[in-house]
Amino acid sequence: MAQDSLATGAKNTWCPGCGNFGILNSLKSVLGALAEEGTPLENVVLVSGIGCHAKIVDYVNVNSFYAIHGRVTPVAEGIKLANPNLKVIGLAGDGDAYGEGLAHLVFAAKRNIDITMIIHNNRVYGLTTGQYTPTSPRGFKGRSTPYGAIEAPVNPLELMMASGATFVARGYSGGMELLKRLVKEAVTHKGFALLDVLQVCVTFFNVYQQYNERGYELKEHDELDYEKAALKAREWNYDADGLIPLGVFYRKSASTFEDAFAAPDIGPEARSKKTGEFLRP
Ligand SMILES: Cc1ncc(C[n+]2csc(CCOP(=O)(O)OP(=O)(O)O)c2C)c(N)n1
Ligand code: SF4
Ligand SMILES: [Mg+2]
């Protein structure tokens, strides 16, 4: 399917050179490929939050929903539970998913609900013009930290693994071939998938040089081994130094929340029977 048919007439207002273009192009390419392989595009729903990243849903011609800042994950979960046949892809900012919405992400991972969360991790609040986020490095100078952030950043990959995510990966908006592969793997994974994308904000945190020099693709890494994956996830902790591994860190096959939710012994029918029994005098 031609990627062009996924385009919309909306005017793109991202800054020239913004890493969001890389995510947009890889998403369109993967959706086009999925359509060719038999996934009807009317079964795909994109959910975004509030921020520069969120505009991506305006630029892709499939069903979509703008959530509020910090609430991409629960809206995506609700859509999936209401209709488990849908392929639900959440597209959230780092401020959105790792800041205001962090608890939602942890619980979605814990229950292994079959949604994909793609995080546009530019390590800054882009839309509100440059405040620090949970993944900004120590010393980051922005609107809210003019003398430099004094906190260590959170490591979302480690956190997601510890929370129970069954697919954890990191891509880079400047590495398109790998990014396309990772988006496809994340979207087709059954269970909760977290794809953290290092998405460069050229205007408020331009780290292209750092990522180009230090990013490397994981090779011969055993993504089924939790301990090894956790060690790899710790190799770069989102601070200033170190080489940056990219690729799939961890993958596991496990039953999903919605499968259990629909199971005969605990699904809606069983629950209504139990409620009836409880209500009988
Ligand atoms: C509930 C709520 N809190 C805060 C805001 C203000 N706000 C809008 S966008 C934004 C930051 C967005 O940063 P991020 O999620 O990293 O997205 P980016 O712009 O970097 O893509 C904030 C704080 C809001 N709109 N709603
Ligand atoms: S402010 Fe940053 S994240 Fe937002 S569109 Fe511009 S470059 Fe992209
Ligand atoms: Mg951001």
Image (cartoon, rainbow, N blue to C red):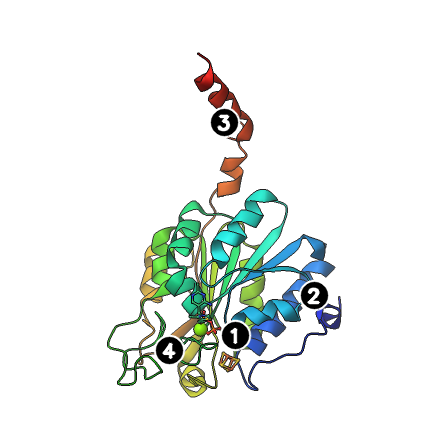
Badge 3 crowding class, 10 Å Cα cut-off, few under 14, some 14 to 19, many 20 or more, is few
**Quadrant assignment for the C terminus:** top left
N-terminal-most mark, 2 or 3:
2
- The residue that label 4 is drawn on is 131
N-terminal-most mark, 3 or 1:
1
Across and down, in percent, residue 183 comes to 56, 65
- The residue that label 3 is drawn on is 271
Please tell me which residue lies in front, 125 or 45. Answer: 125
Please indicate, yes or no, whether residue 202 appears anywhere in the rendered image. Answer: yes
Q: CA distance from mark 1 to mark 2?
A: 18 Å
Across and down, in percent, residue 279 comes to 46, 18
- Label ID, residue 52: 1
Q: Quadrant of residue 235?
A: bottom left
Q: Is residue 186 above or below residue 79?
A: below
- Image point (60%, 72%), residue name: 24
Q: What amino acid is labelled 1 in the image?
A: Cys
- The residue that label 2 is drawn on is 61
SS class, disc 3? helix
